[in-house]
Image (spheres, rainbow, N blue to C red):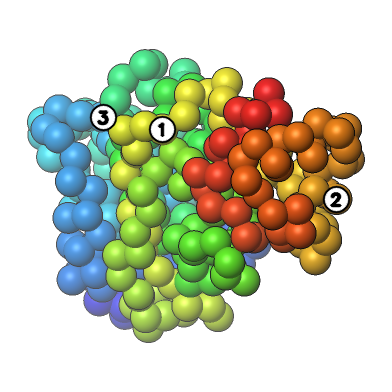
Amino acid sequence: MKKKELIQFVKSLGVRPNKKLGQNFLFDRNILQCIASLCCRESHELMIEIGPGIGNLTHFIYSAETELIIIEYDKKLAHFLIEKYKDTKVSVIHADACSLNFDQLSNKRSYTCIGNLPYNSSTPILSRLLHTDNKPKRMCFLFQSEMAERLASENNCKSYGAITIKTQALYHVKIARKISENVFWPAPEVKSTCVVFTKRIDAVNSDVFVKLSEVVTTSFLHRRKKLISNLKANYQTKLLEKVFYNLNLDMSSRPENLSVDQYLDLTSALS
């Protein structure tokens, strides 16, 4: 669908792109095909798409063999999609992905998540998926480029933070493709990047992840402070000194200095 056709079609539905909802419709066919190809899902595996809009990406990921659930927050777009896919295996849910129960939705099945996420709610959506018991086997999302860099960052970098560690404790994160603002309507004011997440074979379980999240969140309370100083908010000094010594951690380390594996070791030692 070309840009002019997209604009006319969206207007015919009575929809005006809502900046608060982060509605930027992706219309370039080549980019859509590329994103769809990055899913690498297994046949018959459940697929969940978040933020389908008018279904441009849905068109490329849908197949008769695949069960597809699409989640759309905009009421008019959700009703359009329900009508469009009423005689297929596609299930359309009118809901806010930030508050959706993905464990209930997936019902213990293996699944892949994909979507052109609204940039103003991409972090809450990702965080919700990370905290599910039945986590996606694979994810492929469009993010603001700055956020994508944070997710794929290495330690000792300015972009490295709590969300980096939480995500990489569960997934291998790969920046797949930079995407021009010119393939969206309306064009976003920020750069976009497609990121692929593949679940680690050694991904921590939900109980460990909760503990890791607590340690990491506390660690980055004050980025400029020493790591051990931040951790004193929740842990006794003597315990921290003992743990740092046993793990051979520098007492003067800043939060961004430790690797993901070191944070996992630190979490284990503090549990």
Q: Nearer the viewer, residue 209 or 250?
A: 250
Marks 1/3: CA–CA distance: 21 Å
Report the residue marked by disc 3: 46
- Nearer the camera: disc 3 or disc 2: 2
| Lower sequence index among marks 1 and 3 | 3
Instruction: Report crowding for label 2: few under 14, some 14 to 19, many 20 or more residues within 10 A (C-alpha).
Output: many
Which mark, residue 229?
A: 2
Does any portion of residue 40 appear in the rendered image?
yes
Q: Nearer the viewer, residue 4 or 56?
A: 56
**Rendered residue at 31%/20% (across/down):** 109
> Taking 99 as reference, is 3 above or below it?
below
Marks 3/2: CA–CA distance: 45 Å
Residue 180 at x, y = what percent?
37, 80
Residue 241 at x, y = what percent?
79, 40
- Nearer the camera: disc 2 or disc 1: 2
Does any portion of residue 72 appear in the rendered image?
no
Relative side of 112 to 15, left or right: left
Under mark 3, the amino acid is Leu
Q: CB of mark 1 within 8 Å of CB of mark 3?
A: no
Instruction: Report crowding for label 1: few under 14, some 14 to 19, many 20 or more residues within 10 A (C-alpha).
Output: some
* Callout 1 secondary element: loop
Q: Nearer the viewer, residue 205 or 238?
A: 238
**Rendered residue at 36%/48% (across/down):** 172
- Nearer the camera: disc 1 or disc 3: 1
Report the residue marked by disc 1: 203
Relative side of 198 to 96, left or right: left
| Lower sequence index among marks 3 and 2 | 3
Q: In the rendered image, which quarter contains the C terminus?
A: top right
Exactly how many numbered labels are in the figure? 3
Marks 2/1: CA–CA distance: 28 Å
